[in-house]
């Protein structure tokens, strides 16, 4: 099964008057869709755009694995565990909310900030919060989120380049930039594919450079 979701099908959110524009891939907040609650462990894939000086004030999370990928700009992160970091393009940030944590996310720079934030449901709720940032992750280095039984693969591709989509019970493919082909489907920025029980899938870059996030999800 391959389910293609286009960028213009995302739910609008955020607070544009405050410089926050959000596009939700899954049911979120007031946009409730009982047929679009999750895909495997993945329960949110939000495209966030923050104007300079805009951001999310301190707010709580619990029982969620939060993974953030910055597309452009710089994201300031502060949390109740004492972590304060700047997340840049190429960095992977993970906040395991576990039994409960509070954090702030802001654009403290002078340029617009765009990032993709993905939430995953943990296999076992509760526990102690944890935080990790990997600076400049390489294409050949998958990032494991064992608490959710998931693996993130980052692919940066030039035109004409091919890459395999991992064989997995479920795979979620999100196009950050560029244009790629997956099977018969041409995908552009913001488009996504939810693949279940598919084998031997691959991406072909049509225009680039392309950047693609691939989640390998357990059953």
Image: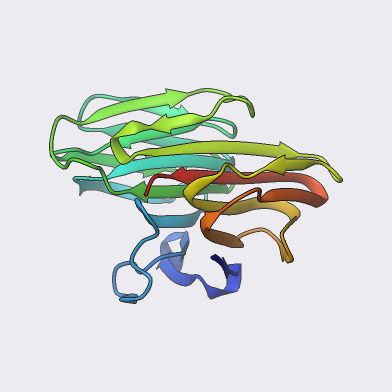
**Up-down relation of residue 203 to residue 76 (above or below):** below
Percent position (x, y) of residue 17? Answer: 44, 67
Q: Residue furthest right?
A: 160
Which quarter of the rendering shows the N terminus? bottom right
- Whether residue 97 is situated above or below residue 198 in the rendered picture: above
Query: 95 and 2: which one is in front?
Result: 2
Q: Is residue 33 left or right of residue 151?
A: left
What residue is rendered at 58% in x and 48% in y? 112
The reply, left or right, for residue 123 in relation to residue 77 is left
Q: Is residue 108 visible?
A: no
Residue 100 left/right relative to 121: left
Which of 174/14 is in front? 174
Q: Looking at the picture, tell me which residue is in the foreground, 49 or 201.
A: 201
State the image coordinates of residue 42 (x, y, percent, origin top left).
Answer: 38, 53
Q: On screen, 133 above or below 159?
A: above
Vertical position of residue 215 compared to residue 30: above or below: above
* 71 sits to left or right of 107: right
Q: Quadrant of residue 105?
A: top left
Q: Residue at x 33, y 67 (%)?
A: 37
Q: Is residue 198 visible?
A: yes
Residue 83, how many percent across, how many down? 30, 25
Question: What colour-coding does the image apply?
Answer: rainbow
């Amino acid at each position: 099964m391959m389910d293609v979701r286009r960028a213009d099908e995302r739910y609008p959110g955020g607070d544009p008057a405050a410089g926050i524009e959000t596009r939700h891939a899954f049911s979120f907040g007031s946009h409730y869709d009982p047929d679009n609650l999750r895909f495997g462990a993945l329960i949110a894939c939000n495209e966030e755009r923050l104007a300079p000086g805009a951001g999310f004030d301190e707010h709580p999370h619990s029982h969620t694995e939060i993974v953030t990928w910055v597309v452009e700009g710089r994201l300031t992160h502060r949390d109740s565990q004492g972590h304060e970091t700047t997340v840049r393009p190429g960095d992977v940030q993970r906040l395991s909310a576990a039994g409960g944590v509070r954090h702030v996310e802001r654009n403290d720079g002078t340029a617009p900030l765009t990032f993709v934030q993905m939430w995953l449901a943990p296999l076992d709720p509760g526990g102690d919060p944890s935080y990790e940032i990997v600076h400049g992750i390489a294409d050949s280095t998958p990032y494991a989120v064992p608490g959710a039984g998931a693996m993130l693969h980052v692919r940066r591709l030039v035109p004409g380049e091919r890459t395999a989509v991992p064989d997995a019970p479920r795979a979620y493919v999100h196009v950050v930039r560029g244009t790629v082909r997956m099977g018969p489907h041409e995908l552009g920025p913001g488009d996504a594919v939810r693949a279940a029980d598919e084998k031997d899938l691959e991406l072909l870059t049509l225009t680039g450079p392309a950047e693609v996030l691939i989640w390998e999800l357990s059953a």
